[in-house]
Amino acid sequence: MARLTVRAHPRSSRRQLRWDGQTLEAWVTAPAAGDAANLAVISAIAEWLSVPRSAVRLVAGHRSRAKVVEVEGLTTLPPAGQAPV
C-alpha cells in the first residue's frame, strides 16, 4: 500500500496534477463544499495511477487542503513530474 501527501486546490479553472516525488498537487474543478473536492481528488488520483477509485482512500485531511491518501495494491509511486490527467 502506498501513501501520498496531497495538496488540494478546489474550484480550479482546470484539472491538473503535479507530482514532485513527495507531494501531489491536485487542482480540481469541484468546490470544497460537501465532499465534492475530496471525491474529485480521489478520482484524479485513481485515473493517474490506473487503479480503481475504490483502491484510493482518504485517511486524513477530510476538511483541509493538506490530505493523506492511501492507494491499495500499489507499492511504488511514479517518478516526479507532471502527472497526466
Image: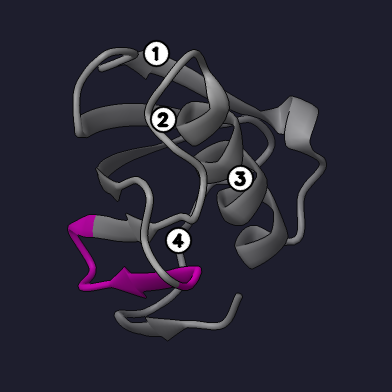
Callout 4–callout 3 Cβ contact below 8 Å: yes
Badge 2 crowding class, 10 Å Cα cut-off, few under 14, some 14 to 19, many 20 or more, is: some
Q: Which residues are magenta?
A: 14-23
- Going by the numbered disc 1, the residue's amino acid type is Val
Residue 53 in the image: state x and y as whole percent.
76, 36
Give the residue at mark 4.
Answer: 77
Sequence-first tag of 2 and 4: 2
Residue 1: tell me if it is visible. no
Q: Residue at x 42, y 20 (%)?
A: 33
Q: Which residue is mark 1?
A: 59
Q: Which badge, 2 or 3, is on the more N-terminal residue?
A: 2
Q: Amino acid at mark 3?
A: Leu
Element type at mark 4: loop
Q: Nearer the viewer, mark 3 or mark 1?
A: 1
Look at the image and tell me whether residue 38 can be seen.
yes
- First-in-chain label (2 vs 1): 1
Task: Work out how far the residue at label 2 is from the one at label 1, CA to CA, in angstroms.
Answer: 6 Å
Viewer-side residue, 78 vs 39: 39
Q: CA distance from mark 4 to mark 3?
A: 7 Å
Residue picked out by circle 2: 69
Q: Nearer the viewer, residue 26 or 14?
A: 14
Q: Where does residue 70 sit, x and y in percent of width and height?
A: 47, 28
76 displayed left or right of 71: left
Which structural element holds mark 1? strand
Instruction: Give the mark, 4 or 1, whose residue is nearer the N terminus.
Output: 1
Please identify the residue farthest to the right as the structure is shown.
Answer: 52
28 up-or-down from 40: above or below: below
Viewer-side label of 2, 3: 2
According to the picture, the residue beneath numbered tag 3 turns out to be 74
Local secondary structure at mark 3: loop
